[in-house]
């Protein structure tokens, strides 16, 4: 089974830009919280989240087209690779998310971007971010405009959950790692 340690080792040479490493961590911690919600293996889901953008930095225009073979050759299980490929469903792959793991990854990938942007605007960062504040920003299409709200909605629909509920799970998952994610806010030191 894929571990966070193995995911970090695999990503080490492929994901070197700070913003992409941070995104990997955000998605990893959000996925851990989703695993907890579904009663699944937290570290395993975190590992999938950490590794999900394996080829993005080197092949942004061909995202997920350079993922399957290298990961399989590195000993990553086929079901783990499938989960990673599924987050590009309808965008750059035809691998439809089927399990809760896959559906969660599809939903939280973009969702964590909006959560991070919300937290960075707040004096106390993610430490006091609530769902009401998040949803207000979520509805503002100009805020974190590059984050695809339709994909988030689609992922949440696949899960049979409301956006606000998935967002709360992810906020809680990321909140526990606020310092590491740089989301403590400007007043954290005071």
Image (cartoon, rainbow, N blue to C red):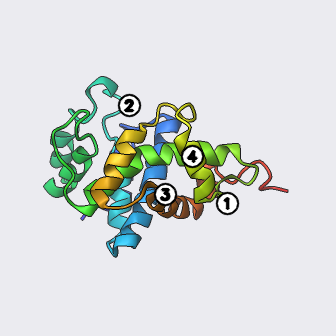
Q: Residue at x 35, y 54 (%)?
A: 156
Q: In front: 6, or 139?
A: 139
Q: In front: 39, or 6?
A: 39
Please, is residue 168 above or below residue 141 in the view? below
Disc 3 to disc 1: CB gap under 8 Å: no
Residues packed near mark 2 inside 10 Å, few (<14), some (14 to 19) or many (20 plus): some
Disc 3 target residue: 164
CA gap between label 2 and label 3 equals: 30 Å
Tell me the tag on residue 67: none
Q: Is residue 7 visible?
A: no
Residues packed near mark 1 inside 10 Å, few (<14), some (14 to 19) or many (20 plus): many
Disc 4 target residue: 116
CA gap between label 2 and label 1 equals: 30 Å
In terms of sequence position, does the residue under pointer 4 or pointer 1 come before the other? 4
In terms of sequence position, does the residue under pointer 3 or pointer 1 come before the other? 1
Disc 1 target residue: 127
Disc 2 target residue: 57
Residue 79 % position (x, y): 16, 57
């Amino acid at each position: 089974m894929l571990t966070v340690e193995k995911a970090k080792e695999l990503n080490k040479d492929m994901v070197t830009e700070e913003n992409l490493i941070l995104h990997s961590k955000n998605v990893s911690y959000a996925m851990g919280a989703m695993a907890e919600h579904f009663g699944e293996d937290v570290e395993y889901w975190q590992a999938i989240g950490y590794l999900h953008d394996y080829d993005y930095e080197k092949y942004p225009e061909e995202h997920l087209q350079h993922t399957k073979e290298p990961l399989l050759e590195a000993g990553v299980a086929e079901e783990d690779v499938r989960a990673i490929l599924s987050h590009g469903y309808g965008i750059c792959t035809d691998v439809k998310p089927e399990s809760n793991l896959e559906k969660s990854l599809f939903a939280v990938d973009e969702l964590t971007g909006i959560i991070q942007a919300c937290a960075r605007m707040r004096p106390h960062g993610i430490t006091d971010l609530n769902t009401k504040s998040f949803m207000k920003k979520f509805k503002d299409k100009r805020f974190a405009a590059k984050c695809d709200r339709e994909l988030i909605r689609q992922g949440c629909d696949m899960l049979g959950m409301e956006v606000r509920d998935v967002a709360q799970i992810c906020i809680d998952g990321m909140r526990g790692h606020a310092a590491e994610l740089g989301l403590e806010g400007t007043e954290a030191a005071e």
